[in-house]
Amino acid sequence: MLGLKVLDYCLQVAAILLGCVVVAPPASADPPVRGELTIRGHSIVTLLLVGKDGGAGIRFENVGETVHLPVGTYRVEAVCLKGDYLFEPTAADRKAWFEVTEEGPNELTVGAPLYPTLTARRHGGFVEMDYGVVDGAGRSYSMESHRGPEPTFTVSVDGQQVGSGTFEYG
């Protein structure tokens, strides 16, 4: 649980640095027009969305199948999944905006299930391999804390095993 406390603190700091706040309208103001966003994914502990209209951010805890939020344009700023998997956006991810309208349908693919990925690059006589996990939208997740054994691999040439090893976290 320490990982979730650290993540919660990091999300709060990120929200402050990015100028993200959970906006509550004044009591006398008309409530904003809201839309329903269907979440295609599960196991989401925390979801932070940032609005395109001035950077207002909205944070959701223990996300279910749908969330309600003011209509507008958003992007995913951070996601924490059960098992301490964490998504933090790259520069390309920060360009992935989606629209929430009153009429819908509004859908966002985020969270589990996660799919394994492997990239390999040759450097002279060595092969550098990177293992990772992505969600259904291709967002990369890292682990906040590492539990369990590292993923293993074997290298075969013409059916003969020529090497094996484990991936190091980080």
Image (cartoon, grey):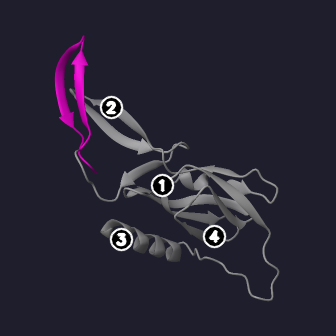
Q: Is residue 97 visible?
A: no
Residue 55's label in the rendered image is 4
Disc 4 marks which amino acid?
Gly
In terms of sequence position, does the residue under pointer 2 or pointer 1 come before the other? 1
Residue 139's label in the rendered image is none
Q: Which residue is mark 2?
A: 121
In terms of sequence position, does the residue under pointer 1 or pointer 4 come before the other? 1
161 in the magenta segment: yes
User: For the view shown, which residue lies furthest in the front direction?
Assistant: 64
Q: Nearer the viewer, residue 131 or 62?
A: 62
Q: Which residue is mark 1?
A: 43
Q: Are marks 2 and 3 in contact (CB under 8 Å)?
A: no
Q: Which residues are magenta?
A: 150-170
Please indicate whether residue 73 sits to the left or right of residue 155 in the image.
right
At numbered mark 2, what does the secondary structure look like: helix, strand or loop? strand
* Nearest-to-viewer mark from 4 and 2: 4
Disc 3 marks which amino acid?
Val
Disc 2 marks which amino acid?
Arg
Please indicate whether residue 29 sits to the left or right of residue 113 in the image.
right
Q: Are marks 1 and 3 in contact (CB under 8 Å)?
A: no
Disc 1 marks which amino acid?
Ser
